Image: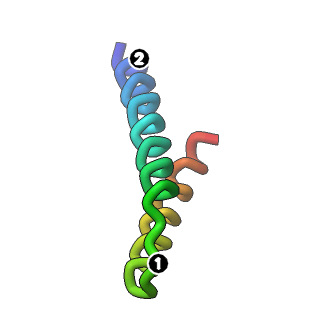
Amino acid sequence: MAHENAKRSDVKRHQELLKQKKELEDNRPHGVEEMRRWKHAMGKVLQELELFS
């Protein structure tokens, strides 16, 4: 049972990460400072998504 709950939360987290990635892709900034923050956020999302591969 605990394993099923962990698996379910993994699936939920994966879906949240994909949603964040899509939102970041759709709202890419143009300013230098905003782009740095965007790049950092996207890197974190991609890094965590890699764990699901």
The scheme the figure's colours follow is rainbow
Q: Residues within 10 Å of mark 1 (few under 14, many from 20)?
A: few
Which numbered marker is on residue 44? Answer: none
Q: Position of residue 50 (x, y in %)?
A: 60, 50
| Left or right side of 39 for 12 | left
Viewer-side residue, 33 vs 9: 33
Given the current orientation, which residue lies at the most extreme bottom position?
32
Instruction: State the residue at coordinates (43%, 60%).
Output: 27
Instruction: State the residue at coordinates (44%, 72%).
Output: 29
Give the CA separation, mark 2 to mark 1: 43 Å
Kindly state the secondary structure of the residue where label 2 is placed. Answer: helix
Q: Position of residue 20 (x, y in %)?
A: 42, 49
Amino acid at circle 2: Glu
Q: Which residue is mark 1?
A: 30
Establish if 50 lies above or below 10. Answer: below
Looking at the image, tell me whether mark 2 or mark 1 is earlier in sequence order: 2
Q: Residues within 10 Å of mark 2 (few under 14, many from 20)?
A: few
Frontmost of labels 2 and 1 is 1
Establish if 8 lies above or below 29. Answer: above
Given the current orientation, which residue lies at the most extreme right position?
53
Establish if 13 lies above or below 11. Answer: below
Instruction: State the residue at coordinates (55%, 56%).
Output: 46
Kindly state the secondary structure of the residue where label 1 is placed. Answer: loop
Q: Picture quarter containing residue 33?
A: bottom left
Instruction: State the residue at coordinates (54%, 58%).
Output: 47
Amino acid at circle 1: His
Viewer-side residue, 47 vs 15: 15
Q: Which residue is mark 2?
A: 4
Q: Quadrant of the N terminus?
A: top left
Is there a contact, CB below 8 Å, between mark 2 and mark 1?
Answer: no
Q: Picture quarter containing residue 53?
A: top right
